Structures are given as C-alpha cells and as structure tokens.
C-alpha cells in the first residue's frame, strides 16, 4: 500500500480504512536480521546519543529513562516535518500497525506507507536496563527494512542513552519519478531525520516533560508530532556540521550505493564531455579488487581501456575549444553522449544489481540528454547574452566536470561497501 499527494495530507476519515488495510499486509522483505548485511545489498545506519544522567541503579517511576520510554511508546520522537505517525493506541505495542506519512519538499509532497512494530525489548539486568522496539516496513513502502529504537541505562553511572540501528534498501515506488527522487535525496532526508530524532527526544524529556506520554488525538486515531521547537531541517552532506546541536556520540553509515546516484552522475558527466564518463568508469574498474567478472565491466577494466579512453577524453577537451566543434545537441553528438552515459552507468553497476542494468543504463542516457541540453543552453547564454569568451566558459565547464568527477568517485560501491564514521 502506497499513496502520494501534493500539498495536502489525508483526513482521519481517509486514514482509518487505510490503516485497516495496512493491518492485512505482510512486510516487504523476507530476510531476518542476520541476513540483512551490506554484502547482501542492505545499507546500515547506527547512531547513539546520551540523553542525560540520573541516579545510579535501575530506572524508577518519573525518571529520565521512564520519560524517554513514554516518548518512544507514543512515537513522538519522530520529527513531523519529515515523518508523521498515525496509529491506534488500542492496539498492543507488539505488532501494532502504523501509517507513516513521509513529507518532503517542504511538506508539499507526501507519501503514505505502512509499517509495523516487529519486536520489543525490555530487560533489566545487573549492569544495565534496555527498552525499545523495532519497526518493519510493509508491502508498498518506498523503503524495505527494519529499524530498532533502543533506550539503555548504565546502572553504575546513571547515563541514559538512545540508540538507532537500521538496515534498509529501496522498496516499492508508485511512479518512476519517485524512484529517481529517492535515489537523489533519500540519504539526506534519512540523515536529517535520524539526527533530529535524537534532538527531539532530548528536548521532550528534558525541556517539555508536560508533553511526555501524551499524543495528539482527533478521534479514532492518534498522531505523533507535538509542536516542539527544535533545530531546522538541514540536509547534511556526508561529513556534516551541526553536531553541536545534535550531540551525537557516534554516527556510522555503511551505505549501499552504486546504482541510482552513480548512474545519474555518469549521465551528467557524459552530457558535459562525452568521453569523461567512460574514462572515469574504466579507471575505477581497473583498480577494483577483486577484478570484475561480468563481460562489460571486464572489458572496461582491461589495461588498455583507461589509456585509450583517457587519450580520447583529452582530445575532446582540446577539440571542444575549437570554433569548428559541432554543437553537442546535434543528432550525432547527442546520441553519442547518451550512449556514453548509458555505457558508463551500466559498467559500474554492482554485480548483485546486474538485473537492473537496463534501467540503470536508461537513467544514464536520460541524464546525459538532460545534461547536454542544460549545459548547451548555459554556454550559449554566457557567450551570446553576457558576452563571456567561449574559451572561458569552456574552461569553467571543465572545472565543474573535474569537481563532479571527484565527488562521484566515492559513491562507487566497492565489493564490501563503504563505511563512514562521522566526526562528533
């Protein structure tokens, strides 16, 4: 089950039957926790923050740990500017089905998907207490995966910490542009949501205890999202500012990249300079260990391929500055750029994504088409209307090309993935 709307959400009368339908759905992935590994195609996210300290020993009524537990049980830890939760409090927490309203583009674009509490933990040992639960996505969700939200109290120090552990991969999409948009912006939305979750939980338990344990209700359903003034939604880059506000002790990502974002970048490169994308792909494939096994990638990784493609790329950079160079949007050059983008995107597709190679190649070709026209228009505007010398505009485009290529290289997926630990 998935629906989307522009500029407005769903009324409670509309949500009630949709929640009933979501209760009949199964989760949209068959794997158990031990199988949701990076090597199997699952991205991993883990973050941890200290909420505060209380008296040593087990949690007691009214303590920081208990207040944080009540926030988790009402799902109010989720920032409603990104994800709002709609549910029935009459359902037991274990197995409770929830409608997630995913909000993007300043809450103008909204998706409605289903999720369910998959497992719960409540443990009081000699050294620590743990409370939390996991959520699992249901059929029709734009993501597939499981996410744990856990509170932990150290009995000796009294420190209460909050942990998020998630394994996810792309799920189902209602249309092609949603899939493309997810590939482009989903990691940044996820990162912003994770960090704001830590901020929001701390704000609620420390500064707004009067809101703890309560949730907004308009009748048959309850809704997360008390109005709490926290940090603005910021879409952090990989190494982000803002840790002073979020105060994360640890944040680790093992992101499974390599198909959507890389294909898009390859197409943009090909639209700027047709030989740049296959040259970059070939040089990266030639250094991959172990060497690629499929025929296309193996050909691109052959020792002579980077040299030949590199020479062609240099020749194109020189020829682009000559007055007799044809316009890139003419039929033959444009077709060549689209083929170049498709070839480069397909060649760096991870082996476990090989079944999607046609879709990845198409994305590379479309991106090359759009990039060709965009940079052609920008170059004509700069030279014809603004009077900037053509050579200067071409050199600026070369600099942009080099910058994009340097940013694109880290998104190539190595055989074991890439783990990034963000500084705190």
Image (cartoon, rainbow, N blue to C red):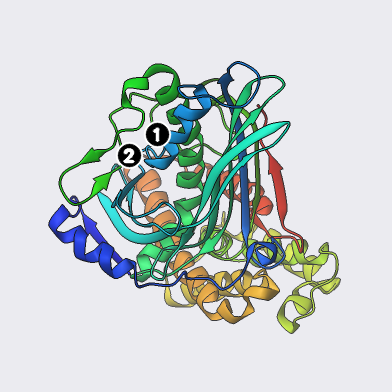
Point out the frontmost of discs 2 and 1.
2
Who comes first in sequence, dot 2 or dot 1? 2
Do callouts 2 and 1 mark residues in contact (Cβ within 8 Å)? Answer: yes
Q: Nearer the viewer, residue 53 or 193?
A: 53
Query: Looking at the picture, how far across and down is residue 100, in whole percent?
Result: 34, 54
Q: Which mark is residue 81?
A: 2
Quadrant housing residue 238: top right
Left or right: 153 in relation to 13? right
Q: Check disc 1 and report the residue beneath it.
A: 233
Quadrant housing residue 20: bottom left
From where the camera sits, is residue 311 visible? no
Q: Quadrant of the C terminus?
A: top right
Left or right: 305 in relation to 65? right
Query: Looking at the picture, how far across and down is residue 116, in whole percent?
Result: 42, 59
Query: Looking at the picture, how far across and down is residue 122, in whole percent?
Result: 57, 43
Task: Say which element carries label 2.
Answer: loop
Q: Nearer the viewer, residue 354 or 157?
A: 157
Query: Looking at the picture, how far across and down is residue 324, in whole percent?
Result: 52, 63
Q: CA distance from mark 2 to mark 1?
A: 8 Å
Task: Say which element carries label 1.
Answer: loop
Left or right: 221 in relation to 338? left
């Amino acid at each position: 089950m998935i629906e989307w709307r522009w500029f407005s959400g769903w009324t409670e009368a509309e949500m009630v039957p949709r929640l009933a339908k979501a209760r009949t759905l199964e989760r949209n992935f068959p794997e158990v926790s031990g199988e949701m590994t990076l090597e199997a195609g699952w991205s991993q996210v883990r973050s941890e923050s200290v909420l505060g300290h209380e008296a040593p020993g087990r949690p007691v009524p009214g303590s920081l740990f208990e207040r944080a537990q009540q926030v988790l049980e009402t799902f109010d830890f989720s920032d409603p500017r990104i994800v709002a939760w709609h549910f029935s409090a009459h359902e037991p927490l274990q197995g409770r089905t929830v409608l997630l309203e995913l909000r993007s583009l300043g809450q103008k674009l909204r998706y409605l998907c289903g999720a369910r509490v998959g497992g719960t933990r409540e443990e009081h040992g000699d050294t620590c207490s743990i409370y939390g639960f996991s959520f699992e996505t249901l059929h029709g969700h734009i993501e597939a995966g499981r996410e744990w939200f856990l509170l932990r109290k150290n009995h000796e120090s009294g420190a209460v910490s909050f942990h998020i552990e998630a394994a996810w991969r792309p799920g189902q999409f209602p249309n092609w542009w949603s899939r493309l948009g997810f590939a482009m912006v989903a990691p940044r939305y996820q990162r912003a949501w994770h960090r704001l979750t830590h901020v929001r939980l701390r704000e609620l338990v420390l500064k707004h205890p009067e809101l703890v344990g309560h949730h907004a209700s308009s009748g048959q359903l309850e809704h997360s999202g008390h109005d709490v003034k926290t940090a603005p939604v910021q879409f952090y880059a990989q190494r982000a500012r803002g840790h002073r506000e979020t105060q994360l002790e640890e944040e680790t990502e093992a992101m499974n990249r390599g198909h959507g974002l890389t294909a898009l970048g390859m197409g943009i490169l090909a639209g700027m300079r047709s030989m740049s994308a296959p040259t970059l792909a070939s040089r990266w494939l030639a250094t991959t260990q172990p060497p690629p096994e499929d025929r296309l990638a193996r050909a691109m990784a052959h020792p002579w391929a980077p040299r030949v493609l590199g020479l062609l790329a240099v020749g194109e950079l020189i020829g682009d500055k000559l007055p007799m160079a044809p316009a890139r949007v003419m039929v033959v050059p444009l077709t060549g750029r689209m083929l170049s983008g498709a070839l480069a995107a397909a060649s760096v597709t991870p082996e476990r994504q090989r079944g999607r190679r046609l879709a990845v190649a198409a994305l590379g070709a479309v991106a090359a088409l759009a990039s060709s026209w965009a940079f052609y228009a920008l170059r004509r505007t700069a030279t014809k209307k603004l009077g900037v010398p053509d050579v200067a505009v071409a050199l600026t485009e070369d600099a942009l090309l080099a910058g994009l290529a340097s940013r694109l290289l880290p998104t190539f997926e190595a055989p074991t993935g890439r783990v990034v630990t963000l500084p705190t």
